[in-house]
Image: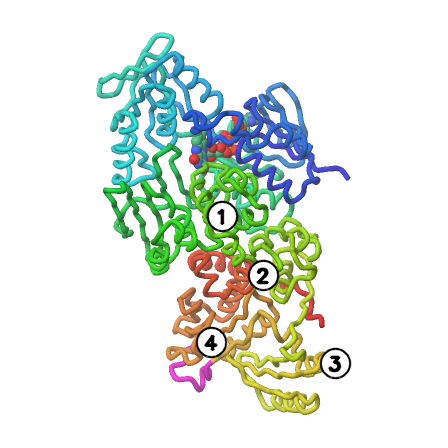
């Protein structure tokens, strides 16, 4: 079979991560060629700060060495930039006039450092801080010269300044703003940071506007617009970057601030994608790796024709990589008329914490001195967690380091750059007997990017070592395995064609066939996360017989159905007929030989026992219910008919009340609908979710909500816990998106098989 030709322009962090994602889905589908302008294989640009600071070496920041390209049959051209793209002929032409055809093209050219157009900016001794070459230039300069100025008091500038101090230079940091890191910190945190860095030997010149670089051939100093001057042998410009779109210019590929892409990183030209800092998604250009890695996943799914919700944008978080100084910032960090904030300052420990609340939701955070809570707070900001939940979490999380680690949920993200959860780290430590943070890094990618989460990863490792694996076992699916829910989902998504036995083998199941806990969970996940139909094996009752539950749509029945049920009960000598919670009748004690016939005569085909819609309860309806405003019986019937056969992570009961008095107790159910003058209101675990819907829209919205629940909840996870984990805002956004797209729940399971 002819492989599709995939060409990648840019051998940096985003482009190569996208290739890794593609290889994880289809290792053999593409013939891959990568062009890099730099002479090195793919390396971790983030860690250049650590190289400059002397904490690591250029060699050790390689992410994929030459052997990786070879092993994956990737042709790599380094030091050979692509000069032209011909989208009609579908070729790229390099600076060495090499012409290479493509079927699919990824542009991942990153950014160019912004150099202030000052007089004298071209002099020897003026540099950016973007790549290995810049780093080497600074190291060389420090061997001969002693005085450096860094222009820019942002994250990059401060990291460069710390590196130059370590290299023995005297360093001034020149910043145009009133305080440093003003794009990430509020003034209080910035002042604490400045004091700390001054103690380390940095000198700050704030509110200074650079005007001219002086000197003959080599730089001698920097003059400011106020006429003052500072001596310098080396000037590092760290004042920002601009997306590198040069190669796309004039090709018909749409460029705004950067190359414009959709949620799957597709440009306006077919078969041409852009990812990373050179791409603009919904008006945003991202300059941190976590969003770029997420983009890579969406791109890979699109290229490999895999289902994926698409890239949805990211909440940004930053951590300063200067040893001995812990700073974290995410989301909104400044106060405004629409926000409230809580602040804690500890003058003894020299720590500061600020959490910003907008519309009663967590919207941003700044931490100084102790950043252990950074990942958790980032999760809350992303999920737009309610203030009430934050309050609970703060009570739970306060305590010793051990208590904080123990209090972290399995799904809490530890490594924001790579999206690695505590559960994945604990699972890897236990399954693979990992003994060091480097082992964990190699195995899970946690702490492999900015390294800011390294202390938390070390704490988790230490905790597991001291407390044994008991803690981890609690996270596993059941005693047959040490894999947790996230591991199982990941394996199914990665190997969607594998049979259940093969997956169990891959994940190191200790039993041959699994048990009553892991078997249904595995079937459920295979149905939802692979594209194959999976049989449902119905669970028997305690005595080995079966149970059937005739549907009474919307809680409504009539003489004919009741007579039919009575006849069936007598005919098959069904020993127990019982009314259960919700409007549900259950017939117990049906023998195996009779169950199929009973189901057929009851006209109920759905598996009677399992996780799905239990029933839709209704109040007495528009005619009989007091204060009725909408037709609850019609909506209840419609909902139950539409949703009856869906298998869900956990059983769900819906209640529909026609009006003000909530007679069906909708607010007490997982999902409730209440009639209002303007239409239907939808409630999830008692919280108002969506309003003013006409019946069709109410059905579609409920279905969309359940669709998202089916796709993202863990097996056995009740709606309330799921909403708390994901965050009601995100659930609402996702449900709305599905409603607007008219998404219909696919039921991937075959009919119940006995
Ligand atoms: C010192 C430093 C510290 C940082 N710290 C952090 C941090 O702590 N956290 C964080 O999230 N992010 C950090 N970043 C930002 C992060 O490194 C970038 O967001 C990330 O590298 C962007 O990935 P990219 O692939 O889009 O661009 P790049 O990694 O820059 O890769 C683009 C590549 O394309 C090549 N290229 C350009 N044009 C062509 C062409 N025509 N043909 C072939 N190749 C071409 C470039 O030479 C480059 O190698 C830091 C950046 C720097 C410089």
Horizontal and vertical percent position of residue 157: 36, 28
For the residue pair 227 and 175, the one nearer the viewer reads as: 175
The mark closer to the camera, 2 or 1, is 1
Q: Determine if residue 242 is in view.
A: no
The kind of secondary structure element at disc 3 is helix
C-alpha span from label 3 to label 4? 37 Å
Q: Earlier in the sequence, mark 1 or mark 4?
A: 1
SS class, disc 1: helix
Which is in the foreground here, disc 1 or disc 3? Answer: 1
The magenta span reads 619-632
Is residue 594 shown in magenta?
no
Residue 627 spot, x, y in % from top left = 38, 81
Q: Residue at horizontal 59%, vertical 91%?
A: 559
Nearer mark to the viewer, of 2 and 4? 2
Mark 3 or mark 2: which comes first in sequence?
2
Return the x and y of residue 568 as percentages of the image width and height. Answer: 67, 88
- Here the colouring is rainbow
Along the line of sight, which residue is nearer the eye, 633 or 309?
309
Q: For the point 27% across and 25% down, which residue is it?
A: 203
Disc with the residue nearer the chain's start (3 vs 4):
3
Q: CA distance from mark 1 to mark 3?
A: 53 Å
Q: Which mark is residue 478?
A: 2
Q: Name above or below for residue 129 compared with residue 21.
A: above
Going from the N terminus, do you reach mark 2 or mark 4 first?
Answer: 2
Q: Which residue is mark 4?
A: 656
Count neighbours of disc 1 (C-alpha within 10 A) and say few if under 14, some if 14 to 19, many if 20 or more. some
The reply to whether dot 1 and dot 3 touch (C-beta < 8 Å) is no
Labelled disc at residue 593: 3
């Amino acid at each position: 079979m002819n492989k599709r030709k995939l060409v990648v322009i840019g051998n940096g962090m985003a482009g190569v991560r996208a290739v890794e994602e593609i290889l994880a889905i289809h290792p053999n589908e593409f013939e891959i060629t990568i062009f890099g302008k730099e002479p090195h294989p793919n390396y971790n640009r983030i860690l250049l700060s650590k190289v400059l600071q002397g904490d690591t070496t250029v060699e050790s920041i390689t992410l994929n060495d030459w052997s990786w390209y070879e092993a994956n049959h990737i042709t790599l051209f380094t030091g050979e930039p692509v000069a032209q793209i011909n989208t009609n002929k579908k070729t790229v032409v390099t600076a060495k006039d090499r012409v290479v055809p493509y079927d699919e093209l990824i542009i991942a050219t990153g950014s160019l450092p912004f150099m202030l157009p000052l007089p004298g900016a071209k002099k020897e001794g003026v540099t950016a801080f973007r790549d290995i070459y810049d780093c080497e230039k600074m190291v060389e300069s420090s061997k001969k010269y002693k005085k450096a100025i860094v222009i820019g008091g942002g994250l990059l500038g401060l990291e460069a300044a710390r590196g130059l101090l370590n290299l023995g230079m005297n360093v001034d940091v020149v910043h145009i703003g009133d305080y440093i890191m003003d794009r990430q910190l509020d003034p209080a945190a910035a002042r604490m940071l400045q004091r700390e860095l001054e103690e380390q030997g940095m000198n700050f010149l704030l509110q200074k506007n650079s005007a001219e670089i002086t000197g003959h051939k080599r730089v001698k100093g920097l003059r400011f617009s106020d006429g003052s001057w500072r001596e310098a042998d080396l000037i590092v410009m760290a004042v920002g970057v601009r997306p590198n779109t040069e190669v796309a210019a004039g090709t018909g590929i749409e460029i705004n601030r950067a190359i414009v892409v959709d949620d799957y990183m597709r440009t306006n030209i077919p078969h041409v994608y852009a990812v990373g800092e050179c791409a603009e998604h919904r008006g945003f250009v991202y300059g941190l790796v976590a969003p770029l890695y997420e983009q890579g996943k969406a791109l890979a799914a699109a290229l490999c024709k895999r289902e994926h919700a698409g890239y949805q944008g990211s909440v940004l978080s930053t951590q300063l990589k200067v040893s001995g100084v812990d700073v974290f910032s995410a989301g909104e960090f400044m106060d405004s008329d629409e926000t409230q904030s809580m602040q804690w300052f500890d003058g003894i420990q020299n720590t500061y914490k600020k959490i910003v609340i907008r519309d009663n939701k967590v919207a941003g955070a700044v931490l100084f001195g102790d950043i252990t809570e950074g990942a958790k707070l980032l999760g809350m900001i992303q999920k737009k967690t309610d203030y009430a939940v934050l309050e609970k979490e703060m009570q739970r999380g306060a305590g010793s380091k051990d208590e904080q680690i123990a209090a972290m949920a399995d799904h809490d993200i530890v490594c924001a750059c790579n999206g690695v959860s505590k559960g994945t780290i604990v699972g890897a430590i236990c399954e693979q007997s990992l003994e060091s943070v480097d082992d964990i890094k190699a195995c899970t990618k946690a702490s492999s990017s900015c390294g800011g989460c390294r202390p938390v990863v070390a704490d988790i490792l230490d905790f597991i070592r001291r407390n044994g694996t008991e803690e981890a076992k609690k996270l596993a699916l059941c005693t047959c395995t040490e894999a947790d829910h996230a591991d199982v989902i990941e394996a199914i998504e990665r190997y969607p064609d594998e049979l259940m036995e093969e997956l169990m083998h891959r994940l190191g199941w200790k039993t041959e066939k699994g048990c009553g806990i892991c078997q249904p969970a595995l079937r459920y996940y295979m149905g939802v996360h692979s594209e194959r139909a999976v049989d449902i094996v119905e669970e028997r009752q305690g005595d080995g017989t079966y149970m059937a539950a005739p549907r009474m749509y919307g809680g409504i029945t009539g003489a004919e159905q009741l007579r039919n049920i009575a006849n069936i009960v007598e005919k098959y000598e069904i020993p127990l007929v019982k009314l259960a919670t919700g409007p549900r009748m259950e017939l117990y004690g049906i023998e195996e030989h009779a169950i199929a016939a009973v189901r057929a005569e009851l006209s109920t085909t759905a598996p009677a026992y399992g996780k799905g819609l239990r029933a839709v309860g209704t109040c007495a309806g528009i005619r009989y219910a007091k204060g009725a405003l909408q037709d609850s019986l019609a909506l209840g019937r419609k909902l139950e008919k539409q949703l009856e056969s869906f298998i869900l992570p956990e059983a769900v009961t819906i209640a529909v009340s026609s009006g003000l008095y909530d007679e069906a107790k909708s607010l007490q159910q997982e999902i409730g609908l209440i009639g209002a003058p303007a239409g239907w209101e939808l409630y999830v675990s008692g919280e108002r979710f969506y309003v003013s819907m006409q019946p069709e829209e109410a059905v579609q919205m409920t279905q969309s909500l359940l669709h998202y629940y089916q796709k993202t909840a863990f097996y056995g996870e009740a709606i309330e816990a799921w909403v708390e984990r994901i965050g009601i805002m995100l659930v609402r956004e996702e449900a709305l998106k599905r409603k607007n797209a008219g998404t219909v729940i696919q039921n991937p399971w075959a009919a119940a098989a006995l």
